[in-house]
Image: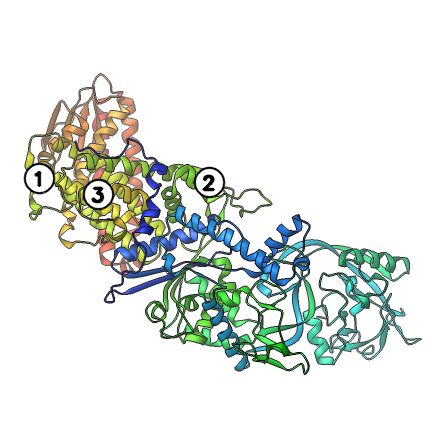
Amino acid sequence: MREIDMPGKYDATAVEAGRYDKWVQENRFKPSGNDKARPYSIVIPPPNVTGKLHLGHAWDTTLQDMIIRQKRMQGFDTLWLPGMDHAGIATQAKVEQRLAEQGVSRYDLGREKFVDQVWDWKNEYAATIKSQWGKMGLSLDYSRERFTLDEGLSEAVRKVFVTLYEKGLIYRGEYIINWDPKARTALSDIEVIHQDDEGAFYHVKYPFVEEGVTYDGKDYIEIATTRPETMFGDVAVAVHPSDERYKDLVGKMVRVPLVGREIPIIADEYVDPEFGSGMVKITPAHDPNDFGVGNRHDLERINTMNEDASMNERAGKYVGMDRFDARKAIVADLQAEGWMLEIEPIVHSVGHSERTGVPVESRLSTQWFVKMQPLAEQALDMQKSDDRVDFYPPRFEDTFTRWMDNIHDWVISRQLWWGHQIPAWYHKQTGEMYVGMEAPEDIENWEQDSDVLDTWFSSALWPFSTMGWPDEDAADFKRYFPTNTLVTGYDIIFFWVARMMFQSKEFTGRRPFKNVLIHGLIRDEQGRKMSKSLGNGIDPMDVIEKYGADALRWFLATGSTPGLDVRFSYTKMDSAWNFINKIWNASRYVIMNLDDETKAELPADLSVLTLADKWILSRLNETIASVTKNFDKFEFGEAGRSLYNFIWNDFADWYIEMTKETLNGNDEAAKKNVQAVLAYVLDNTLRLLHPIMPFVTEAIWQEMPHDGESIVVAAYPEVKAELDNPTAEADFQSLTDLIKAVRTIRTEANAPMSTEIDVLIKTSDENLARIFDENSDYINRFVKPKLLEISADVAAPKLAMTQIISGAEVYVPLEELIDLDEEIARLQGDVKKFAGEVKRAEGKLGNEKFVNNAPEAVVAEEREKLADWQAKLAATESRLAELQAAK
């Protein structure tokens, strides 16, 4: 046996140590530079520089790495471009939290010094993220790494902003927006998470101003509100124009309690007459619907809160109070002064900031917006063209379409210090506004808008800004854009996927990527979302330390189907490690039994190979076809199942075992053939596995006798028609059916391999008899019979255990071990099982819809199955009758 550097047990730490750095140093991950090769590109969804990567990142990037590694091996000119996102509000919140622990606020530092602090944070966590990428084995081209605040990307952001502004698609105006009072910034609709909170409907009297005016015998109307702290901004009460109950009240005036301001009762179709009393207070500065009503009726907008959600001077004596403290005080005063009619406890949906978690305020504010309808229509039209983006699974295109059909204008300004500052300047004397790529020349007379752009504004440009756009002659932009595949989770279809699609169409005229593969979320074993509050988060680096990156990648790659969530499980991680250990041990056996000159090349004359050789090569061919097809469909779970079954069952449990007789024998020619087949199958199997398990496949491949430098750039396996051998597969199936039948008898009779047994095979199928005769060495090795008889004339012994296989009956006389009653009971069970299969197949073939619509080959296969089950049933019933008669 050859001396090799492979210990008897797989050690992930030893296998993975230093290997990634070597790949990077050898430039294995850069594009090939072959202009004749077809380009294939992926841009990494840039992780936020807010902290370490989590299991969701590990899943997302593993899928991308698998795709790019396979394409690289298939000869594509591949680019997987890495980068990170500045993540404006999220990163700023993290840095502010760190400063708060030191008793410092951003206002203490000032903008410039605070931004320096954020850059320090970015550099710290960017280094951590890159280290984690290496641990996971991601084949990224670091020479092209980008950051969303790079100068090149900043130029792209300014170009997009200025162009949209000049087209009238970006505008500035005063509108109701979602406001985060903790971060003190505007939020887009999709940055607001709604959750059920306990609250109340406060039923309050609003008295009529004019004497003698009543409704339902009362000198007031009843208004219900969940937010009494906004009463100071009330400017009207609205009813529906067709509500007969209130038609005589329209135009009357009521007084706001505690405020004393007189406000009119107006009619507006916004009001739902079926909800509550059908009367609602209108507060245009604190509710988006009320804002619309106010515009239609030219009502005043009264903002009653400061940026931090404390009450401002318009709130009278409550000025300076936190909004929720003010609510309690206002409720107490309403009760004390007799204005409160009822407090009705409720549970209602309240918007919270995705980043800081605090309840969001609807707040009147001057902000920058993108006019979305023209851009959305363009993106939807693109989906009807040849330049469409294909979603996997396709159902997620409906999610995209529904959102685009119902889209609102996008508020893009954020009251933050970390991010792309809006390229707009205001003249200090005249107030004139200037928007441009560069600052005005007489800059001392101008002041730049202090707001920054929403993080998603720059992220939306990622597929083309990273390639050198707006320089349309940039080499990477011309060669690698549009990109081929985007991999991302379903939770950011709105945030990111949709925005990349409409911005790419607007500015490049093309789709940003051909395919978008949508995956789900990582959940814990109980199906719960991983979160800090539940304490169920799992650090992928901890998993890698225990099991190795390849085991984690195998679990993530094969654990679910596209679009669905996956549950993390240590039991499944144990299984993944065991599978790799099986691969390691099988490979170790093969490599130790190869000669130094053995190449992974098959004999020119395949007819000299054994049945087992031909079978394993045919099965390998099928596995290559299945894995390649399923990779192309992004069905990695199915690809994994094909690999697992081939490696564990076909290669390790059957073929390798069958080679031992030849490798230990004296026939040198036969030994050479077996070594060639072993080397060929192992080599191709490692190549198939490499995209999923890069570390262990490289380690094993380097131990094989070949001239290749690295499996990273080795050619991906292809189906070879000459290796397809359905006859060998059918013959081998018969052989293994026989071996398994005798093993089953040994197990049931408690007859270990050391117990001598006779094996009698009754078959009138000459081809089957030939197969068993020609492969009697295998039968002897695997079932160890004292006597092996194969004949059509075999007489069934009375006291023998029986197994029925396709085309044959297998008898093992065991007079001293057999219990006749038990054998009869077992055969009765087989009769029941075979009868069930016959009934199932007959039912299927009796279904005209199946027979008429299914492919002809599928129907033919079902008929063959029926005939086989019928033959097994008949043989079993016959043997059962014999034993019952003998008894």
Q: Is residue 587 left or right of residue 19?
A: left
Quadrant for the N terminus, please. Answer: top left
Q: Label 3 sits on what residue type?
A: Leu
N-terminal label among 3 and 2:
2
- Which is nearer the eye, 739 or 528? 528
Residue type at the position of mark 2: Asp
Q: Nearer the viewer, mark 2 or mark 1?
A: 2
- Residue at disc 2, secondary structure: helix
Q: Are marks 3 and 1 in contact (CB under 8 Å)?
A: no
Disc 1 marks which residue? 766
Q: Which residue is mark 2?
A: 542
With 631 as the anchor, is 315 left or right in this view? right
Query: Which residue does the numbered mark 3 point to in the structure image?
Result: 682
Left or right, residue 187 beside residue 690: right
Q: Quadrant of the C terminus?
A: top left
Q: CA distance from mark 3 to mark 2?
A: 31 Å
Mark 1 crowd level (few <14, some 14–19, many ≥20, 10 Å Cα): few
**Which secondary structure, mark 1?**
helix
Give amino acid for label 1. Glu
Numbered circle sitting on residue 223 = none
Q: How far is the residue under mark 2 from the one under mark 1?
A: 59 Å
Q: Residue 802 is drawn in which quadrant?
A: top left
User: Element under label 3?
Assistant: helix
